[in-house]
Amino acid sequence: MTPPLAPAPHLLLTDVVALAREAGEAILGVYAGAFTVQHKADRSPLTEADLRAHRILVAGLGRLTPGIPVISEESPAPPLAERGAWEWLWLVDPLDGTREFVERSGEFTVNVALVRRHEPVLGVLHVPVTGVDYYGCRGAGAFRQERDGHAHPIRAQVPMAQPPRVVASRSHRGDRLDGFFTRLGAHELRPAGSALKFGLIAEGAADVYPRVGPTSEWDTAAGHAIAEAAGATVVTRGGDALRYNARESLLNPDFVCYADASRAWHTLL
């Protein structure tokens, strides 16, 4: 469908970070005032901020890499019979953590990932409220950039802290996650919203991120790419690599993200 990327994926990072920041500014323009919350068919919230960021990202990626399709949370995805043949695609969540946005916790992100042959190879997470960016690319490492533009390399921590620091959803808890904690034993829990959890693993501020329950591919692909570029791993309950654009459904199976492989983390899910 699309010839191999030219330039190489890592050369796209600066432009994708700038695009995510532009989307973040649009989100903050809505966040600063009163806004209406609608609900989609799956009962997840939707605001004008989601839609503004969606339009910016889809248009910007279209200009940056013409011919590479974009799948966004805020637009219908083609059936697998069509998209399954794509070598490259962008996976976008214009506003990951809309519940956190509505609750004004500040823990929401703009997620942009480039996927090749079912694997995320480039990811950008922008945090509009703090102005922080996490970004990374296979073979080029992972970085954290502050609001002022200063960037530094980040790396997931090995060996893990004792007790291990577990980062888990602030909005989604339940018996299955509690079961993971019980099987794990002593740990330090660090709640966080949205894809920020991947950023915390990537920068060595947490050791393991378990996710049981539904997420979509656009929720995880960017953070997955960054975490892997920082030396972490993302696997399913069965111990297999988490893959993208490989199923009719864009819902992910349960997964766990970690860097220290001294424990079989997937067996605790």
Image (spheres, grey):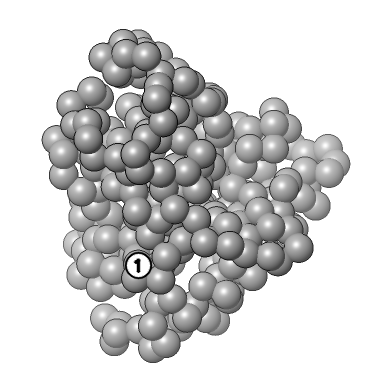
The foreground one among 150 and 240 is: 150
Q: Is residue 69 above or below residue 52?
A: below
Residue 162 spot, x, y in % from top left: 39, 25
Q: How far across and how far down the image is residue 202, in percent?
A: 45, 49
- In front here: 26 or 106? 106
Specify whether 10 is left or right of 196.
left
Query: Badge 1: few (under 14), some or many (20 or more) residues near its Cα, within 10 Å?
Result: some
In this orientation, does residue 34 appear? yes
Residue 245, image quadrant = bottom left
State the residue in front, 99 or 161.
161
Mark 1: amino acid: Arg
Task: Provide the secondary structure element on which disc 1 rests.
Answer: loop
Asked where in the image residue 201 lies, by quadrant, the reply is top left
User: What residue is drawn where x is 58% and y is 57%?
Assistant: 144
Identified at 71% across, 54% down, the residue is 131
* Residue 14 quadrant: bottom right
Vertical arrangement, residue 114 with respect to residue 165, above or below: below
Q: Is residue 152 left or right of 221 when viewed as pictured?
A: right
> Where's residue 151, x and y in %?
62, 64
Residue 91 appears anywhere in the view: no
In the image, is residue 172 above or below residue 42? above
Name the image quarter holding the N terminus: bottom left
Instruction: Give the number of callouts.
Output: 1
* Residue drawn at 30 percent across, 36 percent down: 256
- Quarter placement of the C terminus: top left
Which residue is tagged 1? 138
- Residue 34 percent coordinates (x, y): 83, 37
